[in-house]
Amino acid sequence: MKLSACTRAYVFLTMMVVCVVVGGACFGFVFGGWTAAAVGAGTTAVGVGFGGLVHSRIAVAPLPSVQTDVAAEGIADVVVMGVALYEAAVFPVIPGGVSDREQRARRILAYRLAAYDALPRVVRISAADALEIIDEGLDKKRARTAVKALSLTVYDCRTAP
């Protein structure tokens, strides 16, 4: 059964909380027997719960616009990487070093990444230009220049206020 990343994170967090509470119980047992173990587990559970509540409110506090800008920058970097990987598949170092299937897979991925809605428009246009030149498959130097222009466009978007 395949679990989503969110579900795995919750399971991991739950296991950590259980381990901390059991540690509090063991600590209490060592210093005072079963009664102290129950008190230690209870106070540890209350402390972890309070800490989780306070931390979750702090984690949600940042401005959504800042998170969106950071996400767009990350996606733009991934677009550059995807287009560069597609370029490497079209113009491999060793002739015949990349199968047609792998080249198609990299092409599909590069196009999907370049079409992502959260990207700035200039990045999508630059990525489309680079992909068009790479699709021609005629001039390696021209394709390299287009990928370089894409990476400079992403850099300019990152440094723009």
Image (cartoon, grey):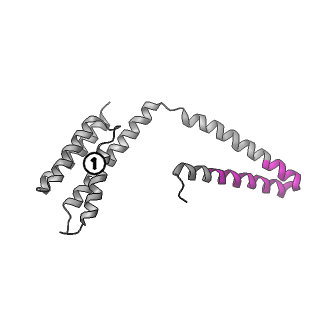
Expressed as whole percent of the image width and height from the top left, the position of residue 149 reads 20, 44
Residue 47 lies in quadrant: top right
Residue under the image location 61 percent in, 38 percent down: 55
User: Is residue 18 magenta-colored?
Assistant: yes
Is 43 colored magenta in this rendering? Answer: no
Say left or right for 26 vs 116. Answer: right
**For residue 155, above or below residue 7:** above
Which of the image's four quarters has the C terminus? top left
Secondary structure beneath dot 1 equals: helix
Kindly identify the residue that appears in the image at 55 percent across and 34 percent down.
60
Q: Nearer the viewer, residue 22 or 118?
A: 118
Residue 99 is situated, as x and y percent measured from the top left of the image, at 25, 66
Residue 159 relative to residue 70: left or right: left
Q: Which residues are magenta?
A: 13-41
The answer to which of 161 and 8 lies nearer the viewer is 8
Q: Main secondary structure of the magenta part?
A: helix
Near mark 1 (Cα within 10 A), the count class, few <14, some 14-19 or many ≥20, is some
